[in-house]
Image (spheres, grey):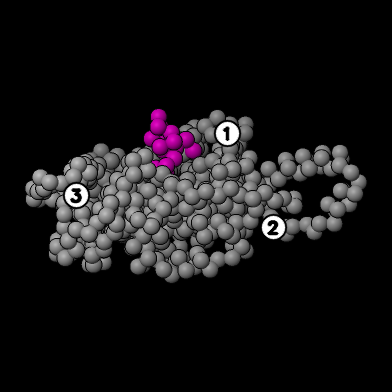
């Protein structure tokens, strides 16, 4: 059975073909921009588990120097109950022998010289590292550049990196084997192509103005330069190096070159200080020198992680794109036949996406600006489709599916309420908002021909973290249809 999905205008900006306003959207696979595999692997990494010291640590000998006494006191202040005092290598390994992966503690080795030892367990084996601390800098390991506010964060970051080295080597190898040719198909170009063309036109006007004022010989030299390929949204011969710097990202972020997740808790990748291009350090070496600083002010919200987006709008639990689109659909699209199933014009959806990125909440979405309400509906679907982590997250997906397979309705609703509780706050709020909206749309089925099942068919590939290459979404559609039908009951008990 072919995968049930909508292509239409939403896909136009990510490689699909836009439908004509009023025509039903054909069935074709949804093309995701972001690759979830590394993110899902990070979720599977063992969590840090501090081993608390259960014994009373002996005081320093009476003849100890003032420096030794102060060092002992400092360790207690820095590491708290995770500090086990003076302990040798063998005793440390015995302590970790029966602990679970991710367990760790801090000790002072008998041979230590100005450092402490971090001992932890990963993949059923103990590991030991020289641990240092510098005021104003933080905790760090000897010979490594990363700095951490707490030992817990250091261990969490280390466990993720160990886990990636063990399980993600094929993906990391693919990242390392990329070429500069991947740039044209990168998320950066997918999400920003139209903006770059607009900025390129502005640069072209500026360049034309300058050429009128430049000497004739200089004009002749410029005319001899070969034109760039037609697919380049920056048709001008334009070069400006990026200014990449190692960056610690808050929230979840993906590489805009290879589309893979930036794993870890600190120094996950690099960011261009001028235009905001985000990438793995290795990927940044392949990014062509086409930095457009003006792009930074219209980077926008499409393709940004939902939790990160909500943190930028502390006064609203629902992202403004979702809120504005829903309000507009409910104002003039509830009686529109095939709402959400029928596509809008691809170029109008792209224009609205650019406007929302550029102008934010002030964007004019009125009927005067966008007469076809299917353009608004298509833009909402596009926003949700471009979320790196779907509304029903990878972690919660199995619980939702298990609930959907339950035969008894009362038990099904109870299990769905438990699944909803597994969602992060931003996803919980936005999913509730969307489901209640879709329930209101379905209430006009007699006119708009979109009942809960029809809406679930359209939204299942967009809202649910379905496994890659899945073609049969029958169960997902049934589960989402039940969610829409019983959303008020389910969220009232969640």
For label 1, the SS is: helix
**Closest to the observer: 185 or 24?**
185
Q: Which residue is mark 3?
A: 82
Other-residue count near label 3 (Cα within 10 Å), few / some / many at <14 / 14–19 / ≥20: many
Name which quarter of the figure residue 306 lies in: top left
Q: Which residue is mark 1?
A: 359
Horizontal relation, residue 220 to residue 51: left or right:
right
What mark, if any, has residue 130 been given in the picture? none
Q: Which residue is mark 2?
A: 231
Percent x, y for residue 40? 36, 58
For marks 2 and 3, give the CA distance.
57 Å
Q: Are marks 1 and 3 in contact (CB under 8 Å)?
A: no
Percent x, y for residue 361? 52, 32
Q: Residue at x 63, y 48 (%)?
A: 291
**Would you place residue 171 above or below residue 349 in this image?**
below
For marks 2 and 1, give the CA distance.
27 Å
**Closest to the observer: 470 or 334?**
470
What is the residue that sits farthest to the right in this orientation? 216
**Closest to the observer: 105 or 435?**
105
Which of marks 1 and 2 precedes in the sequence?
A: 2
For label 2, the SS is: loop
Look at the image and give the residue range highlighted in magenta: 305-321
Which of marks 3 and 1 precedes in the sequence?
A: 3
Horizontal relation, residue 385 to residue 492: left or right:
right
């Amino acid at each position: 059975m072919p995968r049930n999905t909508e292509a239409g205008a939403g896909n136009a900006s990510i490689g699909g073909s836009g439908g004509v306003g009023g025509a039903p959207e054909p069935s074709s696979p949804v093309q995701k921009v972001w690759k979830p595999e590394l993110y899902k692997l990070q979720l599977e990494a063992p969590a840090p588990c501090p081993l608390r010291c259960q014994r009373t640590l002996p005081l320093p000998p009476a003849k100890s120097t003032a420096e030794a006494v102060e060092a002992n006191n400092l360790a207690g202040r820095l590491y708290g109950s995770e500090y086990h005092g003076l302990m040798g290598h063998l005793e440390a390994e015995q302590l970790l022998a029966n602990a679970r992966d991710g367990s760790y503690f801090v000790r002072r080795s008998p041979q230590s010289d100005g450092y402490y030892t971090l001992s932890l367990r990963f993949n059923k084996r103990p590991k030991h590292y020289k641990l240092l601390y510098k005021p104003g800098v933080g905790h760090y390991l000897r010979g490594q550049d990363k700095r951490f506010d707490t030992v817990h964060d250091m261990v969490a970051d280390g466990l993720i990196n160990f886990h990636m080295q063990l399980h993600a080597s094929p993906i990391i190898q693919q990242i390392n084997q990329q070429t500069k040719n991947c740039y044209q198909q990168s998320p950066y170009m997918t999400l920003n192509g139209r903006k770059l063309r607009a900025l390129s036109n502005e640069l072209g006007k500026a360049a034309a103005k300058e050429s009128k004022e430049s000497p004739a010989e200089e004009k002749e030299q410029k005319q001899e330069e070969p034109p760039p390929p037609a697919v380049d949204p920056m048709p001008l011969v334009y070069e400006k190096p990026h200014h990449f710097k190692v960056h610690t990202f808050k929230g979840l972020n993906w590489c805009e070159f290879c589309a893979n997740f930036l794993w870890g808790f600190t120094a996950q990748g690099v960011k261009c200080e001028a235009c905001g291009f985000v990438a793995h350090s290795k990927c940044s070496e392949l990014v062509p020198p086409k930095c457009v600083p003006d792009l930074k002010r219209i980077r926008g919200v499409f393709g940004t992680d939902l939790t990160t987006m909500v943190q930028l709008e502390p006064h609203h639990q629902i992202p403004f794109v979702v809120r504005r689109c829903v309000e507009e659909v409910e104002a003039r699209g509830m009686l529109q036949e095939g709402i959400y199933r029928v596509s809008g014009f691809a170029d109008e959806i792209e224009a609205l996406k650019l406007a929302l990125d550029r102008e934010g909440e002030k964007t004019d979405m009125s009927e005067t600006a966008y007469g076809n309400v299917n353009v608004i509906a298509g833009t909402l679907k596009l926003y949700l489709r471009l979320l790196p982590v779907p509304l029903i997250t990878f972690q919660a997906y199995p619980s939702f599916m298990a609930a959907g397979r339950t035969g008894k309705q009362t038990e099904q609703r109870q299990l769905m309420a438990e699944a909803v509780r597994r969602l992060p706050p931003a996803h919980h709020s936005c999913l509730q908002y969307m489901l209640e909206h879709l329930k209101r749309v379905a209430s006009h089925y007699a006119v708009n021909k979109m009942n809960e099942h029809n809406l679930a068919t359209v939204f299942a590939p967009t809202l649910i973290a379905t496994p890659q290459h899945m073609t049969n979404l029958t169960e997902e559609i049934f589960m989402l249809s039940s969610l829409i039908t019983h959303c008020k009951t389910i969220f009232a008990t969640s």
